[in-house]
Amino acid sequence: MCGAIKGGPSLEGVDVAHQAVIQGVVVRGDDPVPNAYVRLLDRNGEFTAEVPTSATGQFRFFAGAGEWTLRTLAPRSEAVDTTVTAAIGVVAEAVVDLQKVSVHA
């Protein structure tokens, strides 16, 4: 097992007091999922942004305050939607486990 790193990327050098941060990690069981894509959708389901996960499965968005949906897309998995609430001065952490929704070919 590789062992996924808990939470999102390091916040060193990030002024979280004046921003709403959404971050986390995509895993399949205990293993990080690199090169998955995490989309940020607004409360109406409209696409706002997309980032690939790092080699350790981590991702981060800077967003406005409010309700957001993270849509995670990865090979051998169904799309996974996770609802998060962003607020100024708060880091919203999400862990998306693809093992629970994997598609077996």
Image (cartoon, helix red, strand yellow):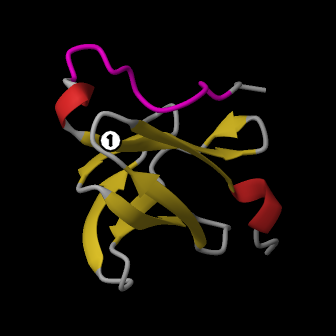
In the image, farthest residue toward the top: 12
- Dot 1: what SS? strand
Image mark count: 1
Give the amino acid at mark 1. Val
- Horizontal side of 19 relative to 100 (left or right) equals left
User: Mark 1 packing: few (<14 Cα in 10 Å), some, or many (20+)?
Assistant: many
- Asked whether 75 falls inside the magenta stretch, the response is no
**Residue bounds of the magenta highlight:** 4-14
Q: From the image, which quarter does the N terminus lie in?
A: top right
Q: From the image, which quarter does the C terminus lie in?
A: bottom right
Res 105 seen here? yes
Above or below residue 93? Residue 45 is below
What x and y, as percent, mark residue 31? Answer: 70, 36
Q: Residue at x 30, y 83 (%)?
A: 46
Q: Residue at x 57, y 64 (%)?
A: 82
What x and y, as percent, mark residue 104? Answer: 82, 71
- Give the image quarter of residue 20: top left
- Horizontal side of 23 relative to 1 (left or right) equals left
- Give the image quarter of residue 5: top right
Read off the residue under disc 1: 21
Res 58 seen here? no
What x and y, as percent, mark residue 35? Answer: 45, 50
Q: Residue at x 17, y 33 (%)?
A: 18
Magenta segment's dominant SS is loop
What x and y, as percent, mark residue 75? Answer: 59, 65
Please name whichever residue, 69 or 58, is drawn nearer the observer in this view of the structure: 69
- Horizontal side of 100 relative to 70 (left or right) equals right
Please name whichever residue, 6 or 91, is drawn nearer the observer in this view of the structure: 91
Above or below residue 75? Residue 22 is above
- Asked whether 9 falls inside the magenta stretch, the response is yes
